[in-house]
Amino acid sequence: MPTKRSVGRRGRAGVAAVLIALFASAIPALAPGAVQAETPLADWDRRSDGSAILDLVIHEQPLAAPAIRFVDAVGTVRRLEEFRGKVTALHFWATWCVPCRYELPTVDYLQGEVGTENFVVIPLSLDRDGLAAVQAYYRDTGIANLPIFMDEGMQAARAMKIFGIPFTVFVDREGREFARVVGDRDWSDPDVVALVRKMID
């Protein structure tokens, strides 16, 4: 199981706040109309002691996801609609984002443990330095289960109203967004893996 630098709740919140502020100031188009947190998934998203597992945020009714496009490692344009029929986790990240760098190995672990014909993680890199930066990070970190996808021009992030990274959006089998996670998590945590399995089922 991958190791991840421990980040306390207060520290994580501070990092998230800084990232959101930087993201909003650098890319104003991502902030207006951003989808806000609504209702915690209280019945699923709880450990035995009552604490939150992922701090999932859901919509009262699933939202139709926009028809986003992104590019794979060989330059082929891919579309979210290709993944209909699976529960999909759109994971927005970048190599320049320090929490993202610590988090992605745990996302890779989740894909290795849970990825099936019913579930897939789509990691969307926002790196302006392009494919080479992502390939180097994958190689140096030993990322083995995740494909490489580039969100060129941050078009998918804008369409999904992402206001900071890391940021994860869950899309159901019908192509509807039903939950989001703001900020970094340890996706290799056994409780997290079990929760994602419940979401797939």
Image (cartoon, rainbow, N blue to C red):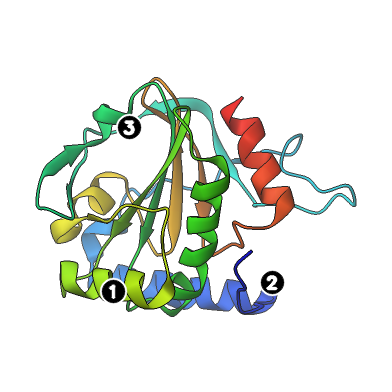
User: How many angstroms separate mark 1 from mark 3 (CA)?
Assistant: 25 Å
Above-or-below relation of 201 to 11: above
| Quadrant hosting residue 106 | bottom right
Q: Which residue is depicted at the point 45% across and 51% down?
A: 168
What's the residue type where badge 3 is placed? Ala
Q: Which residue is depicted at the point 67% across and 49% down?
A: 192
Q: Nearer the viewer, residue 104 or 176?
A: 104
Mark 2 residue crowding within 10 angstroms, few (<14) / some (14–19) / many (20+)? few
Mark 1 residue crowding within 10 angstroms, few (<14) / some (14–19) / many (20+)? few
User: How many angstroms separate mark 1 from mark 2 (CA)?
Assistant: 24 Å
User: Mark 2 = which residue?
Assistant: 9
In this picture, residue 16 sits left or right of residue 144: right
Q: Position of residue 175 (x, y in %)?
A: 36, 25
Q: Nearer the viewer, residue 140 or 69?
A: 140
SS label for mark 3 = loop
User: Mark 1 = which residue?
Assistant: 25
Label 1 vs 2, first from the N-terminus? 2
User: Mark 3 = which residue?
Assistant: 65
Q: Position of residue 59 (x, y in %)?
A: 52, 33
Q: Does residue 152 appear anywhere in the picture?
A: yes
Above-or-below relation of 30 to 134: above
What's the residue type where badge 2 is placed? Arg
Disc number at residue 197? none
Q: Are marks 1 and 2 in contact (CB under 8 Å)?
A: no
Q: Does residue 40 appear anywhere in the picture?
A: no
Q: Position of residue 70 (x, y in %)?
A: 18, 47
Label 1 vs 3, first from the N-terminus? 1
Q: Which residue is depicted at the point 36% across and 57% down?
A: 92
Q: Which residue is depicted at the point 43% across and 23% down?
A: 173
